[in-house]
Amino acid sequence: MVEETNLATMRIRTGEFFERVMKKLGDKVNRVTMEERFQFSNSGDPLNRVFALKSGKVKLTRLSTLGRDHLLEILGPGDVFGLEALVGENVWFYTATSMESVEVTWAHVEDMRQVLADNHNLEMQLLRSFAALTQQRYERTMTIRDLDVPGRLAAVLLYLGERFGETSEGGLVLPRGLTQRELSQMIGASRETANKILADFCNRAWITHENRLITIIDWERLSRRAS
């Protein structure tokens, strides 16, 4: 599996390059705070803004040809979404929804394109970083898909723990408010199946699951299940 440290490095680089662009935009940059379940974009909408997440989490989802929602990614502070516009995309191919109160900065695509046109080196750095990040996300997704359903869920829990986990006396606590539906969308299974697997992991003392809060208590064994 693609190591999360590599993904984290690509996220940081992409975010840093994006911030350099935003500084050149000056007062054309907007900063807003949005509440939980705010929809920044809907699949098929015109892609005319790029967003940088300052606080909170945003989920990216897409409807499959069978009419099922798939959760593509959960973004956190420092992540950028909408950069596809800079490589020729004109519409959003995913829906971006806040999972909690979030703070973002955003700019119009045309303003960003003008800055990049005037700063070719910065443009190349940003696009190369974004391309590498996209490739690593794709490789992670393809690796997870090669696992059985319990293995996929174990891998997703580990991934969420590495990205957003908070250390406590009982273990590594995953993001609060993460629903079974969202977990099932990440692994391509039904909500009922995800619930049964979570119960099995609890019985094996790999995790605890209480009041919609998941805590990883045996990282090593969960890692073996994900391999």
Image (tube, rainbow, N blue to C red):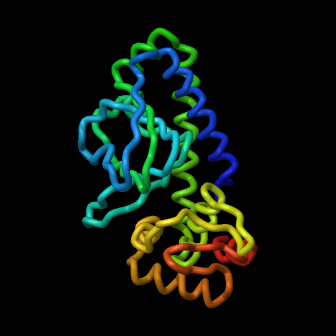
Count of labels in the image: 0
Is residue 102 left or right of 96 when viewed as pictured?
Answer: right
Left or right position of 1 against 141: right
Q: Is 17 above or below relative to 44?
A: above
**Residue at x-position 62% and y-position 90%:** 203
* Horizontal arrangement in the rendering, residue 169 relative to residue 2 (left or right): right
- Name of the residue lying farthest toward the top: 118
What x and y, as percent, mark residue 156? 56, 66
Q: Quadrant of residue 92?
A: top left
- Quadrant where the image shows the C terminus: bottom right
Residue at horizontal 48 percent and vertical 86 percent from the top:
196
Above or below, 59 relative to 16: below
In the rendered view of the protein, which quadrant contains the N terminus? bottom right
Query: What residue lies at 71% left-to-right and 68% top-to-bottom?
Result: 168
Corner quadrant of residue 82: top left
**Residue positioned 30% across, 30% down in the render:** 48
- Residue 15: give x, y in percent of width and height: 56, 34
Which residue is nearer to you in this view: 18 or 32? 32
Extreme-bottom residue of the structure: 203
| Viewer-proximal residue among 126 and 24 | 24
> Residue 141 placed where, x, y %?
52, 58
Horizontal and vertical percent for residue 60? Answer: 40, 52
